[in-house]
């Protein structure tokens, strides 16, 4: 079970920690004050994003938490039903159809679902580093 968690969270950890490590390396390797200042600003931006993720995770009515229930869960069920119908139809000779959502809602979901998942992953990582 731990190897699965490491596999799933390892890529996320690398995605979020790599920019911070890169910014710190840039600060240490900076040859001029201008480059050092730019690296410090990048570090502050990444740390601010981390702090926002921690605050979002602590707030019961945060946009991430509400969005998860209103957007991610329904679309997860919809996508899962598509796969289920594709499996069940040939097995039982059925002709079930999953009705498509309106194009505007689908295009919003393609932006919002990854944003919410990334927000959740950032909050999880921030909590792990806070320990």
Image: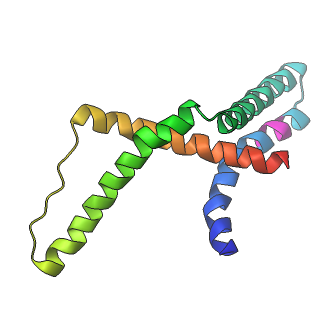
Colour logic: rainbow
* Residue 17 seen in render: no
Relative to 53, does residue 98 appear above or below in the rendering?
below
Screen quadrant of the N terminus: bottom right
Q: Position of residue 53 (x, y in %)?
A: 68, 36
Query: Start and end of the magenta stretch?
Result: 22-26
Residue 46 is one of the magenta-drawn residues: no
Q: How many marks?
A: 0
Q: Going by the image, does 64 lie left or right of 69?
A: right
Tell me which corner region of the image, top left, top right, bottom left or bottom right, holds residue 6: bottom right
Q: Going by the image, does 8 lie left or right of 112?
A: right
Relative to 34, does residue 14 appear above or below in the rendering?
below
* Residue 28 seen in render: yes
Query: Which residue lies most toward the front here?
Result: 60
Q: Residue at x 79, y 27 (%)?
A: 44
Q: Position of residue 29 (x, y in %)?
A: 88, 37
Q: Position of residue 100 (x, y in %)?
A: 19, 46
Q: Residue at x 73, y 33 (%)?
A: 46
Q: Residue at x 44, y 36 (%)?
A: 112
Q: Going by the image, does 108 lie left or right of 22?
A: left
Choose between 44 and 120: the one closer to the eye: 120
Q: Residue at x 29, y 34 (%)?
A: 105
Q: Going by the image, does 3 lie left or right of 21?
A: left
Tell me which corner region of the image, top left, top right, bottom left or bottom right, holds residue 27: top right
Magenta segment main secondary structure: helix
Choose between 75 and 8: the one closer to the eye: 75
């Amino acid at each position: 079970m731990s190897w699965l968690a490491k596999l799933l969270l390892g890529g996320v950890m690398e995605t979020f920690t790599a920019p911070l490590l890169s910014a710190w390396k840039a600060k240490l390797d900076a040859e001029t004050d201008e480059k050092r200042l730019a690296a410090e600003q990048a570090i502050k931006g990444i740390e601010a994003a981390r702090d926002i993720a921690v605050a979002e995770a602590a707030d019961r009515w945060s946009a991430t938490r509400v969005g998860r229930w209103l957007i991610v869960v329904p679309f997860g069920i919809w996508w899962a039903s598509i796969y289920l119908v594709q499996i069940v139809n040939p097995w039982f000779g059925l002709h079930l159809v999953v009705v498509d959502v309106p194009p505007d809602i689908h295009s919003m979901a393609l932006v919002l679902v990854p944003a919410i998942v990334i927000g959740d992953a950032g909050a999880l990582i921030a909590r792990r580093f806070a320990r």
